Image (tube, helix red, strand yellow):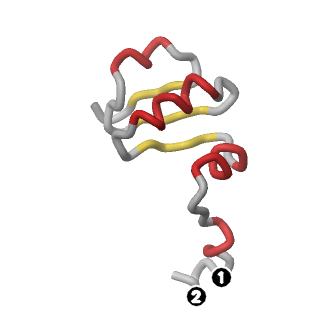
Amino acid sequence: IELRIPKIQSYFTDSLSELVEETDVLVIFQNDPELAALIHAHPQKTFIDMIRIDPGLRSEENYHGIAW
């Protein structure tokens, strides 16, 4: 993959808070209560949920459920 995208490693992080700060759109593929809390804590970010982490989040403006 590094042959096609030479700087890909520079885009990886182990820090969830750093990831949220550095991005505008986050796509969720894991059911984790910490992720649901992020949606409430960062209304300026867009979250796309691929697994339905919490049906109660549907009313949040920055939350979009897809594929369920």
**In the foreground, 55 or 18:** 18
Picture quadrant where residue 33 is located: top left
- Please, which residue is most extreme toward the top here? 59
At label 1, the amino acid type is Pro
Q: Residue at x 53, y 34 (%)?
A: 47
Q: Secondary structure at mark 2?
A: loop
Horizontal relation, residue 7 to residue 53: left or right: right
Q: Residue at x 57, y 23 (%)?
A: 40
User: What residue is shown with label 1?
Assistant: 6
Measured along the vertical axis of the image, is residue 11 above or below residue 63? Answer: below
Image coordinates for residue 37, horizontal then vertical, percent: 51, 29
| Tag 1–tag 2 contact (CB < 8 Å) | yes
Q: Residue at x 32, y 37 (%)?
A: 51
**Within 10 Å of the Cα at label 2, are there few (<14), some (14-19), or many (20+) other Cα atoms?**
few
Q: CA distance from mark 1 to mark 2?
A: 6 Å
Image coordinates for residue 26, horizontal then vertical, percent: 55, 43
Labelled disc at residue 32: none
Horizontal relation, residue 31 to residue 34: left or right: left
Q: Secondary structure at mark 1?
A: loop
Image coordinates for residue 18, horizontal then vertical, percent: 67, 51
At label 2, the amino acid type is Leu
Quadrant position of the C terminus in the picture: top left
Labelled disc at residue 3: 2
